[in-house]
Image (cartoon, rainbow, N blue to C red):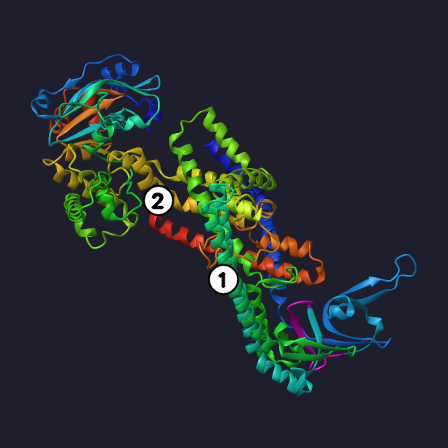
């Protein structure tokens, strides 16, 4: 009786109560979580806002300075700065104007002090032109020319005429380019095959004249002749297509009064931001996103689209998942189900855990040394010796999709092994015993009971691995990612999947555009859009995997009990 | 795992002059060898399984001490005794589930229909196929009800759909579950209630026509209604299958079994027809246990 009263008294003591109930710890925990969530959400929000606003058409301002200069551009940013930090501290505002017209001004951007500005206005017909080359152009439409003859004159009519004819011209331009790329590509491939056949024969029968090499030589000559005939025919066809297109020109006047003539087929997109309503603004916004998602990059990746990079990222990640999943699961199965517990197993397990902490660049170095130069060089010698001789260029003996995927598979292997092991441990022993009691062998138990039950956990490991691989840059720079690689690893030419090809990657593109670009101001917003795209892509891959996992969970893991 | 409970010695009666004899149990607790009381009628029944001088060690700790007993064919035999007396271990030794645990050593032998279970030539997988086992906690596999029932046939490579369906229906009827699940055979077995899951496990165990059915406290995780159903089921299985079951519940042993073996600290104390054990045991120790005066 007595002792129980003392105990109760102790529990109610106000001094031990707070610590005993752990309230301060709860505050700390919730505080830490709040900080973490704020940082993550803040980062995502920042990327989303900056990334998605890049393509929104912003108004063009015509700014006249006190000196009489004028310029036409978008306001990119504003800042306040001290004029002279040492003496009297006066501050002045200035703004960064995207003035474009690089060929005339020699710069894309210009800082203008607020105090120098005389007038600012938004001219109605100010036009933004996205060109194939030379960056943007800002100016006022003057007239549309066909074969140097003015067809329509005056800003309004010329613009209307441009909007009417531009889609057809653009389409024709794309068609011509497609023809040029594909038809010519096919012809060149044919020529190359013939040359390779010749080299093959020479390798097989010696370089001296004999009946085999002669036959191969004749064949090569014949095909070369055919190809040259076909390609000159193609040239003619293309020339006529292009001539019709090149007849159309658009004359502009810049804010400074220069007259500039732009070929219409080289105009990717043009809009008059001060002259369009919400609906048209949305259309321009959508069109620019579409171009970004579906087109090849232009201007050292700082403009145009990132389609090859999307394609490269997705195919590499999926390829990596295909490689790492069976490999990691088998290794984990052996380690957990078959290997006897002992110092050796423990050492292997520790080694795998440590492998997860090796800097990724080390994997890259290993990948280029072992996969590219070692295995790839060996494959080249065995199967591609003719092409090695003919082009003096390696096929597999250099970076490529296959080697990059393998390197990243190696990099993410520890994650998959550890996750799989944990999933295997989590399978209740009662299920295994039930299976053994039914007369199942160990292997039957594993693949009929244990693996299905562990599958959701294995998927978790794979999701983590894919997220890590899709965002990895350092090793990829060594084993196959290139600044520009327009030939996709998966395309319509035989054999459709080209694991030896070098490819583009979104995460590398962030690095390249953001930090290697000659036009860093123009590239900056692209970094945000590419990052946004990469995050979205990884999220999409993960959501797909999570959906599959929840489906598996419903099937294989009890929901209650 | 029974091995971990081993050092718990149940409280013994006999203190305070209650007049109950516990000499034998005290002798067992001291580690002495004691004679086993096996009723003559046990030997008259035709045995399906014979346990001969069987002993088992977990590492250096002896868990089963030299047990010999025949298990009558097509009858229900219950193993009773306080926790840690080795009854589950003995049951798991019958289909060699103890092989899965490291550091287990056995001496003696068991014979299933004349085949030596612990013979080095005996294939343990074949052996387990000749027996069915049901565990304390229902352990349905993560697959459909149908696949659960025909699991043993599947691993034998049976692919004929009509054979599988027939076996499934017979087994589920045998386990008194058919009417409840016949419309949802392709649903996940994990969606069934605990009692249904346990009956499903019984159906799975009988699907391969076992020579012996081993039940390891099949009702300990179930509520009274599900327990009643399982007990009724055990009654129905009698005559068709030889059942060896472990139970903690004296009423269950008296209701559901034909023979009862009382074990204590790894030794068989008394073994005989259930009616004799519960109403007219040879030993007073047995009487005081089955009437609930200790243990």
Left or right side of B82 for A409: right
Give the CA distance from mark 1 to mark 2.
58 Å
Query: Circles 1 and 2: CB distance less than 8 Å?
Result: no
Front residue of A356/A221: it is A221
Residue B160 versus residue A310 in the image, above or below: above
Name the dominant secondary structure of the magenta segment. loop
Q: Position of residue A417 (x, y in %)?
A: 46, 39
Q: Which mark is residue A452?
A: 2
Q: Position of residue B101 (x, y in %)?
A: 33, 26
Q: Given the current orientation, which residue lies at the most extreme right position?
A: A87
Q: Which residue is mark 1?
A: A226
Left or right side of A251 for A185: left
Task: Examine the rendering and report whether any part of residue A197 can be seen.
Answer: no
Left or right side of B178 for A499: right
- Is A19 magenta? The answer is no
Front residue of B44/A481: it is A481
Q: Quadrant location of residue A155?
A: bottom right
Under tag 1, what secondary structure? Answer: helix
Q: Which residues are magenta?
A: A121-135
Q: Position of residue B122 (x, y in %)?
A: 21, 24
Residue B108 versus residue A468 in the image, above or below: above
Locate the C terminus of chain B and report the quarter of the image it occupies. Answer: top left
> Looking at the image, which residue is at 48% across and 53% down?
A218
Discs 1 and 2 carry the same chain letter:
yes
Q: Quadrant location of residue B276?
A: top left
């Amino acid at each position: 009786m007595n002792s129980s009263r003392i105990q109760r008294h102790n529990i109610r003591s106000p001094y031990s109560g707070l610590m005993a109930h752990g309230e301060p710890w709860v505050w700390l925990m919730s505080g830490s979580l709040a900080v973490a969530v704020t940082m993550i959400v803040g980062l995502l929000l920042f990327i989303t806002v900056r990334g998605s606003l890049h393509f929104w058409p912003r108004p063009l301002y015509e700014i006249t300075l006190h000196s009489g200069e004028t310029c036409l551009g978008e306001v990119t940013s504003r800042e306040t700065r001290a004029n002279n930090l040492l003496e009297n501290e006066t501050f002045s505002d200035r703004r960064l104007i995207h003035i474009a017209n690089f060929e005339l001004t020699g710069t894309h951007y210009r800082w203008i002090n607020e105090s120098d500005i005389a007038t600012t206005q938004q001219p109605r017909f100010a036009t933004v032109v996205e060109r194939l080359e030379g960056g943007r152009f800002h100016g006022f439409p003057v007239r549309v020319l066909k074969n140097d003859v003015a067809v329509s004159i005056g800003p309004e009519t010329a613009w209307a005429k441009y909007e009417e004819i531009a889609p057809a011209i653009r389409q024709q331009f794309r068609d011509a380019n497609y023809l040029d790329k594909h038809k010519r590509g096919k012809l060149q491939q044919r020529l190359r095959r013939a040359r390779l056949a010749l080299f093959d024969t020479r390798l097989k029968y010696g370089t001296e004249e004999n009946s085999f090499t002669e036959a191969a030589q004749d064949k090569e000559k014949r095909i070369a002749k055919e190809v040259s005939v076909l390609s000159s025919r193609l040239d003619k066809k293309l020339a006529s297509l292009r001539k019709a297109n090149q007849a159309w020109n658009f004359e502009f006047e810049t804010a400074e009064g220069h007259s500039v003539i732009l070929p219409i087929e080289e105009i990717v997109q043009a809009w008059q931001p001060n002259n369009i309503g919400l609906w048209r603004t949305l259309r321009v916004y959508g069109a620019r996103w579409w171009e970004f998602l579906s087109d090849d990059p232009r201007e050292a990746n700082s403009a145009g689209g990132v389609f090859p990079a999307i394609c490269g990222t997705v195919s590499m990640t999926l390829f990596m998942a295909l490689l790492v999943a069976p490999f990691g699961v088998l290794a984990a199965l052996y380690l957990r189900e078959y290997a006897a517990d002992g110092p050796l197993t423990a050492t292997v397990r520790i080694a795998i855990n440590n492998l997860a902490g090796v800097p990724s660049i080390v994997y890259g170095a290993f990948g280029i040394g072992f996969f590219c130069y070692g295995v790839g060089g060996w494959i080249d010698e065995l199967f591609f010796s003719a092409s090695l001789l003919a082009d003096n260029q390696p096929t597999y003996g250099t970076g490529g999709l296959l080697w990059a995927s393998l390197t990243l598979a190696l990099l993410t292997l520890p994650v998959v092994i550890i996750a799989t092991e944990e999933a295997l441990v989590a399978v209740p022993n009662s299920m295994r015993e039930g299976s053994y009691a039914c007369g199942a062998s160990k292997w039957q138990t594993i693949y009929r009971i244990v693996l299905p039950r562990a599958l959701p956990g294995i998927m978790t490991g794979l999701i983590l691995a894919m997220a890590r691989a899709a965002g990895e840059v350092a090793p990829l720079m060594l084993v196959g990612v290139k600044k520009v690689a327009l030939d996709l690893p998966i395309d319509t030419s035989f054999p459709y999947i080209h694991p030896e090809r070098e490819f583009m990657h979104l995460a590398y593109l962030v690095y390249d555009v953001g930090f290697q670009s000659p036009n860093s101001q123009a590239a900056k917003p692209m970094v945000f859009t590419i990052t946004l795209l990469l995050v979205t892509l990884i999220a999409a891959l993960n959501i797909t995997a999570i959906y599959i996992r929840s489906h598996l969970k419903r099937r294989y893991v009890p929901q209650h009990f | 795992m029974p091995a971990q409970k081993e050092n718990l010695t149940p409280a013994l009666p006999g203190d305070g002059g209650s007049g109950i004899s516990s000499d034998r149990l005290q002798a067992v607790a001291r580690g002495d060898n004691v004679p086993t009381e096996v009723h003559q009628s046990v030997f008259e029944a035709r045995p399906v399984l014979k346990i001969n001088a069987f002993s088992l060690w977990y590492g250096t700790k002896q868990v089963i001490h030299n047990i010999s007993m025949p298990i009558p064919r097509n009858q229900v035999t219950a193993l009773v005794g306080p926790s840690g007396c080795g009854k589950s271990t003995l049951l798991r030794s019958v289909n060699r589930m103890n092989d899965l645990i490291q550091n287990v050593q056995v001496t003696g032998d068991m014979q299933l229909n004349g085949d030596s279970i612990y013979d080095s030539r005996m294939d343990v997988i074949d052996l387990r196929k000749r027996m069915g086992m049901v565990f304390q906690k229902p352990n349905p596999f993560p697959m459909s009800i149908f696949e659960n029932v025909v699991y043993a046939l599947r691993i034998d490579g049976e692919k004929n759909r009509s054979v599988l369906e027939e076996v499934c229906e017979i087994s589920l009827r045998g386990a008194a579950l058919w009417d409840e699940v016949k419309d949802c055979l392709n649903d996940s077995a994990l969606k069934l209630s605990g009692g249904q899951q346990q009956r499903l496990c019984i159906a799975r165990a009988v699907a391969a026509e076992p020579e012996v059915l081993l039940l390891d406290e099949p009702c300990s995780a179930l509520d009274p209604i599900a327990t009643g159903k399982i007990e009724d089921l055990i009654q129905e299985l009698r005559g068709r299958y030889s059942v060896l079951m472990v139970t903690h519940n004296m009423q269950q042993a008296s209701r559901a079994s034909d023979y009862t073996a009382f074990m204590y600290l790894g030794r068989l104390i008394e073994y005989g027809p259930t009616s004799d054990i519960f109403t007219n045991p040879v030993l007073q120790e047995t009487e005081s246990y089955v009437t609930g005066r200790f243990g």
